[in-house]
Amino acid sequence: MRKSKKIHPAFYCMVIPVAILFFIFHTIPFLQGIFYSFTNWRGYGEWEFVGLRNYLHMFQDKDILNSYLFTFKFAIISTVLVNIIGLFLAIGLNAKIKFQKFLKAVYFLPYMLGTLIIGFIFNFVFAHLVPEFGIGAGIEALSVNILGTENAWMGIVFVTVWQSLAFTTLIYLSGLQTVDQDIYEAADLDGASGFTLFRKITFPLLAPFFTINMVLSAKGFLMAFDQIVAMTGGGPGTSTTSISLLIYKKGFTGGQFAYQSANSVVLFLVVVIISIVQLRILEKREANMG
């Protein structure tokens, strides 16, 4: 008979406190949010159950619909850009070049800084430095603060992609370093060109890492908050108000706690569904490539 392995007491000492803290500070608030989404509580005072009224009203709320449209546009564009640029940066950094380690450290530096800090820095850059340069150089397109125009979302996308590139590139780089160089040497002997190597060897072997990056990027960008708060505050008007920012503004300061709790539940479901669909599609693609 096989002897059952005894679990070391240290396991319980480390796992149980963490599990309790997770339950108290994550699970309970999450369940409370679901509960309040079926009420009319404003964050204070009395409340009563209203059933599905909050959820049904969301489909007629222009502010919510517009914020979802912006969030999807922002997430799709940022996800595509960060993965395309990150993949080619990783290929470049994986090549035999000078100062390789230094460049890796430089590219990873933005990810180590807080999103709010970077947002405030670029807020200053777009508001003062870029317009001053544009005026001095006679470039009209750069002579105004882009964050105060209808193209403010472009500034947010630029900063978000720039900061997120570090993590995405690191994932692709780790994938490239698992590829056996003998495969490239054999393909090179067969006369395969650079693009053929990428299409037939590099990208198929990176498919699992591509899946990870796509899912994590989309999930993070769908819940964008910090960079928008720091750079535009959701403006001009409400043109760059993401779902997370709308929930914060109207839920905590607008007396719509229960209503925005319902919005939070819907956002959670949207992120989960999109992540599952992405995984299914990309894993199927991996199987076909294999």
Image: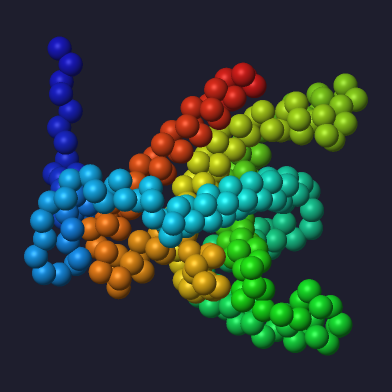
* Residue 46 horizontal/vertical position (percent): 9, 65
Residue drawn at x 60%, y 53% is 78
Q: Is residue 65 left or right of residue 11?
A: right
**Residue 157, percent from left and from top:** 61, 61
Question: Could you say which quadrant of the image residue 208 lies in?
Answer: top right
Q: Position of residue 43 (x, y in %)?
A: 19, 67
Task: Give me the residue at 49% from left, 27% from top.
Answer: 280
Q: Does 222 appear above or below 99?
A: above
Above or below: residue 149 compared with residue 12: below
Whether residue 197 is visible:
yes
Direction from residue 100 to residue 9 in the image, left or right: left
Q: Where, quadrant-wise, is the C terminus in this rendering? A: top right
Give whichever of 107, 82 is nearer the camera.
82
Farthest residue in the front direction?
A: 60
Q: Is residue 16 left or right of residue 147?
A: left
Seen in the picture, residue 278 relative to 189 is either above or below; the reply is below
User: Which quadrant holds the N terminus?
Assistant: top left
Residue 275 placement: quadrant: top left
**Residue 114 visible, this angle:** no
- Picture coordinates of residue 141 (x, y %)? 78, 74
How is the rendered protein coloured?
A: rainbow
Looking at the picture, tell me which residue is in the foreground, 253 or 13: 253
Q: Furthest-top residue in view?
A: 1
Q: Nearer the viewer, residue 191 or 11?
A: 191
